[in-house]
Image (cartoon, rainbow, N blue to C red):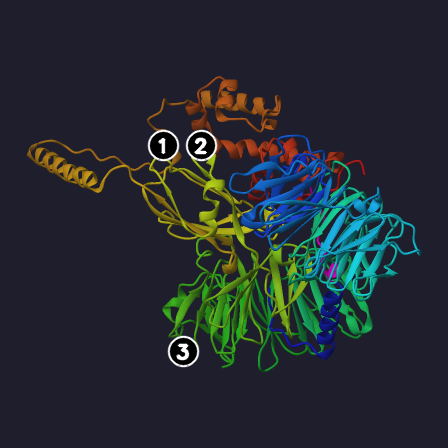
Amino acid sequence: MKTHKRKELKSAEILVFVILLVCHVFPLQANLTAVRNLDNGSGLQDPKVSCIMKDSKGFVWFGTLNTIQRFDGVQFKCFYFPEQVEKVFVIKEIENSDFLIGTNKGLWKYEAKSEILLRIFPEINFPVRSLCYINGKVYVGTSNGIYIIDKEQKLEHLRITDEISAYNQIIGAYATAKDIWFLSPEGIIAYTLSTGGIRIYGKDVKFTSKLSCVVGNDKLLYIGTVTHGVVIFDMLSGEYSSFLPSVGNNHVSALSLRDGILCCGTLGSGVFFISLPEQQIIHSISAIPNDNDEYLTSDMISCLLLDNMNVLWIGSTSYMGVDYLQFRNKPFYPYRFGNQELRNKVFNSLYFVDGIKLLGTPNGFYYICASKSQIEYFPSSLEKNSFGYTSAFIKYNDDILIGTRGGGAYKLDRHTLQLSKFTETNLDVNSFAIDNQGYLWITTLNGLYCYNKDLKIEKVYTNLNSTLVDDKVNYLYIDTKERCWVATDKGLQFLNTKEGIFSDESLPAELHELPPVTYMTEDRQGNFLFCFNKNRVFICDSTFNHLRYVCTPEDAGYLGYSIREVLQDKANNYWLVGSRGVVKGDSALNHFTLFSSTEGLPEPYSNDGQLCGDTIWLATAKGIVFADIHSVPQSAPTVISDFLVNGVSVLAEYGELIEKRGVIALPEDQNTLDITFATLTYDVPDLMIYEYQLEGYDKEWKILRGINSIKFSNLSPGEYTFKVRKQMDENSMQSFQIRIRSSLSAWLWLGFALGGVLIAGVIYTIEKKRRGKKTVQVKPLHNEEEKYRFNKKISDEEAQVLISKLKNYMEKERAFLNPELKLAHVADAVGTSTQTLSQIFNVNLKTRYYDFVNEYRIDEFKRLVSSNEKDRYTLKALAGLCGFSSYTTFFRAFKETTGITPNEYMQQVEPTGR
């Protein structure tokens, strides 16, 4: 897979700098993710969203016609008003995690401890459109002026003018340290906090449009209008200074501002992103797909929130729920060259040298020269270059050599870009290496090949003509002492290149016992690191005295994790490239940081990597990505979003204890716990990877992928500590203690123990006196046949009849489409017992019940994808049509059965009829 890679020249580093600079200045264009929608199918009740708020814990709240709803990135929790309020305009957090809520029918309060909604101050019987909470006072903007609630809960009513006037219709507010700037359709009202004085700033004569919404910073207000886009108001001079660039139809309905980016929602033209320093539109998104295939569910925007994690939440005036997208500066950025779209292509190898990028694909490779603005693709073809998987690259004699699987090796002339084959046979090339005498070495599945500078064969080593232990040679490495390491499927050997002798006699026993090595390297400290395409790396020093495996504790039991190679950057940190994405280890290889899908990788499986200056590049199944080696993943707290005891939610009762990491004491009979959690980064739930451990119950950390809840049943009395975090993110850790009390006293337990010992002694004495009695040994039950051997014997004929009925029930009656289908239902349908049917599955069909049913469901999904039906439904809806009760179950079953994700499968299949 890998080669010894040379450093790039200055031009390549300049290119990287320019790319990173562009990404920094225009983060929206560089790292805008796909738009995701939350609607009824996602759990959002009452999906006409009119306001959005993020609380101090990190939860996002939505106000709708008659509810407020909390979202943790996975699940919703809905709170209904006890009477019709018609519309929620604003939600404001106050002390103790309580909220004030402005509705079309007055002011309400949400009490976090009791989780109830209460109507307060019924005399405020007007639409409440703005709320400010300052120093214990509440400033309520209504259609009938301003109401002020002091610390003693006394209410003061302040009308802007005595006569009927649009200035009394408050539709928004922005608070500074000294003033609250209230917005009315006709102008701005400044309320001075220290004196209670009021100043009115009517609309400028330059425009006649009504005002609609407002945001601001320390000096300026940005005010949305109905017909003139966004106007700027200077709070120091009290003047309307200028307009921002036009945004579609200029009917601005919502604004949100953060870090110099103003997000403008319109009624009919979608959302526009304005860079305030440049006063330029840098991005827009609407219901019409753009070049990146991004689009909203509706152009009619009701509300916006650009939160502190740079997630943009978008509500619409229609019943379509909420759209949201992330454009935070994630560590990894997708690479593209000119107009060439590379984002969704599969890349299995990459190699950068002298300002040239070579990117290997399953059916060819790309040649990119930035200095000449040149990109060429060399596909595999039967007529010219019959090769498939591109496995390795290397620079040799000023040319580029390309290794392939099944097609041998090729030479690319860098001046003419002519490609020619130089191996005599169609070799399966694993890697290249160049020794100190300039000879080229090629490791293959058919032995080890050596070529001279003219690319003519010098030697071929196999296990028939040499002491090479195995013909399957995975890798060859020449270390700083000029020793030639050869890694085969049957072990490591040194090659004496002068005598042509392979030997492993000088290797320590620990290296003899390693799994087949697929990659090795030597770090700057002289240590050797070995990879096996498994979940760990082996490291030893140059003297072979200190040897150990490197693996995070959580990955130790995760056999699905595959490390392909290890790179060392300029700061002596290590980058472990593999199936988890890429893991960054410190210089001592003791602390690790995961970079995966939530850090900008489009696919959490990295096939190859290379360090270039301060940048790491990765080849993935969905494009080439790169990141600054100093970047770190963005962290967010992991919160407990629900806590059930014996099936009943008790989060309201114990939420404060959990936040303070206190001790929750439960009686012995309340010992079944359901814990739901979420790291509040609002990434795609199915891509989230969590680690959890219940100390006192689990011996080690456990991993959950795409699942954010765990159940512990019938826990014994004792002390437990529950810990959960986003994988390899210590900063996101959440923990709390649980004590399950015993109902029996310690003396009673001691009595039971002594009684048990006494009874055991009596039984032992009686048994010892019984002579002539033969003992019967029972063999352990190791397999499914043994498990059912005491059941009634089912003949082959009976089994085949039941299997035939079973398949008929699934295929003709399509019973698998029922998501509630249970083993008992199927047993009734085929006329047998659940015990007999279970025996049929495990003994005769060699499968489990749910695996059997899910195979039919997966086949149905494939059928729908191959037809034109897939365009009518979302992926989640398709899973439901096929009988899966949840998207998570569908995703896991499909990946386990096919080895790829549903999205990857859909990209591979072209629907019929097109």
Location of residue 718 in the rendering, given as x and y in whole percent from the top left corner: 32, 45
Residue 252 lies left or right of residue 626; in this view the side is right
- Element type at mark 3: loop
Amino acid marked by disc 1: Lys
Q: Which residue is mark 1?
A: 787
> Residue 38 magenta-drawn?
yes
Give the image quarter of residue 384: bottom right
Crowdedness of circle 3 by 10 Å Cα count: few (<14), some, many (20+)? few
Q: Which residue is mark 2?
A: 842
* C-alpha separation, residue under disc 3 versus residue under disc 1: 52 Å
Of residues 260 and 881, the one drawn nearer to the viewer in this rendering: 260
| Quadrant location of the N terminus in the rendered image | bottom right
Q: Identify the mark nearer the N-term, 2 or 3.
A: 3
Label 3 sits on what residue type? Answer: Thr
- Range of the magenta residues? 27-39
Spatial distance from mark 2 to mark 3, Cα to Cα? Answer: 52 Å
Q: Amino acid at mark 2?
A: Asn
Residue annotated with mark 3: 543
**Quarter-wise, where is residue 607 in the image?**
bottom right
Q: Reply above or below: 92 against 485.
A: above
Q: Whole-Å distance between the Cαs marked 2 and 1?
A: 10 Å
Q: Is residue 574 visible?
A: yes
Q: Secondary structure at mark 1?
A: helix
**Residue 878 appearing in the image:** no
- Looking at the figure, which quarter contains the C terminus? top right
Identify the residue shown where x is 49% and y is 58%: 534
